[in-house]
Image: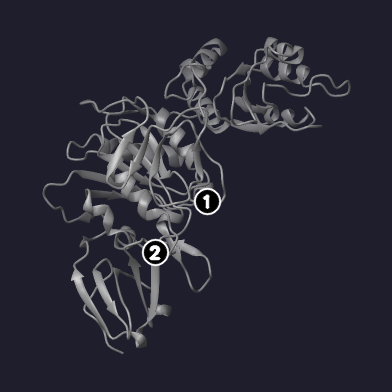
Amino acid sequence: MKNYDVKPGDYVEVSLMKNEYKGIFLQVSDEDKGIVLIKLDSGYNIGFNRKDILDIKLLKKGVVVEGDTELKVKGGKPNIAMIITGGTIASKYDPKTGGVDPLESPESLFKFYPELFEKVNVIKVEVPFMKASEDMDYKDWQKIARVAEKLLNDKNIEGLIITHGTDFLHYTSAALNFFLRDLNKPVVLTYSQRSIDRASSDANLNLQCSALVAISDMAEVVIVGHANSDDGFCYAMPGTKVRKMHSSKRDAFKVVNAKPLAKVFPDRIELLRQHNTRKKINVKIDAKFEEKIALVKVYPGQSSDLLDYYQKKKYKGLVLEMSGLGHVPTKRARDSWLKKIVELQDKGIIICATAQTIYGRLDPLVYSNGRELLKTGIIYLKDMLSETAFVKLGWILGHSEWAKDKNIVKEKMLENFAGEISDRLEE
């Protein structure tokens, strides 16, 4: 079987008996050496049996990757850095298991998507860990923040892209919004719902759009991903106002109670609202975090005895995801939550309220049971998303000088640090 002088990432022409196909030559597993895989200009992948191929011509050399973290730089392009943490965007299909496994190294990602380098030079790549997002905790958020601080304060780097798993991406984006103070450059978190070797992968557009945002004037922590199910454009979404709304669609993430910051096409950005702009200052990291916090969903018939667990385990704070306006069971004769909530707060546990409804904002003043709950001292967090509230509570309570006074905690929880509270609700 003939070997062709082409490498993954090269732009090639594959000639068959009746047709010719142009695209990017992709790497295949050892088990699939009889297959040639290319990414067409449309973004879709197509595979050929090697014995059916008449010729493969090299049309353009691909990106050359040297080592794990250093890339060749071409003049005239802005420089960015990347942090790779795992997730589907940094995985590919494993024919042995039928599932997806992490890529062996950063260059594997770059060989699948050399279009990224048409816009920018990636001059530094950091891989602090490779984890699925469900395996992360606050220590991983802190680690990402420390790496990000170093890269953002490098004068040769204009912006930062962070690749991440989707399921708990919005927790990380919220954490970085609080941890990175005096943000000076764009921090772009991106993802893919489908692995990079699948024909319908969303990684290509997401990475191209992320590159544009990373070199923009937008000094924000944002999530960039598909705006709809097509491959037309992405949204740049504020990291504290976004939630994953679908398990598998490519446009899984939606902005809640606010507008996206921008529409991002492969060749341009259309701003949709005001944003923080670049500054010639150094980022400061403030990644203190109290781990003894919990997010508790309230449901019909739920016993208030559940809260005894958190008191016994010496938790410092709870976010209760209540009904739309902010209610828990209060009128049940055998088990009202009012007494238990007062008891926990008297023990020093901070209790905050968010809404299960996603859209809209809490309003405990509409009904009498809401007014009774408000009198207990619960901190009603307006339209703040539950995931953002959980992260923010851990961050606030991580500061001992704030945590010692409930009034200060309330003041800080209701202070709008990173756009987590909307003055005006928008769809």
Instruction: Report the residue marked by disc 2.
Output: 44
Seen as rendered, the residue at the extreme bottom is 1
Q: Is residue 222 left or right of residue 347?
A: left
Seen as rendered, the residue at the extreme front is 18
Is 166 situated above or below 154?
below
Q: CA distance from mark 1 to mark 2?
A: 17 Å
Q: Is residue 296 left or right of residue 223?
A: right
Query: Looking at the picture, how far across and down is residue 371, in whole percent?
Result: 71, 11
Q: Alpha-carbon neighbours of circle 1 within 10 Å: few (<14), some, or many (≥20)?
A: some
Query: Looking at the picture, how far across and down is residue 354, in whole percent?
Result: 61, 25
Instruction: Report the residue marked by disc 1.
Output: 249
Residue 111 occupies quadrant: bottom left
Q: Is residue 137 visible?
A: no
Q: Which residue sits at x=41%, y=30%?
A: 177
Residue type at numbered disc 2: Tyr
Seen as rendered, the residue at the extreme right is 333
Q: Secondary structure at mark 2?
A: loop
Q: Which mark is residue 43?
A: none
Is 2 situated above or below 294?
below
Is 194 situated above or below 273?
below
Considering depth in this image, is 28 or 130 the residue closer to the camera?
A: 28
Q: Which residue sits at x=35%, y=84%?
A: 50
Colouring: one colour
Q: Do residues under tags 1 and 2 come within 8 Å of each other at their CB atoms?
A: no
Q: Secondary structure at mark 1?
A: loop
Q: Alpha-carbon neighbours of circle 2 within 10 Å: few (<14), some, or many (≥20)?
A: some
Q: Which residue sits at x=39%, y=62%?
A: 103
Residue 18 occupies quadrant: bottom left
Residue type at numbered disc 1: Lys
Q: How many marks?
A: 2
Query: Looking at the picture, how far across and down is residue 101, in whole percent?
Result: 46, 63
Q: Quick one: quadrant of the N terminus?
A: bottom left
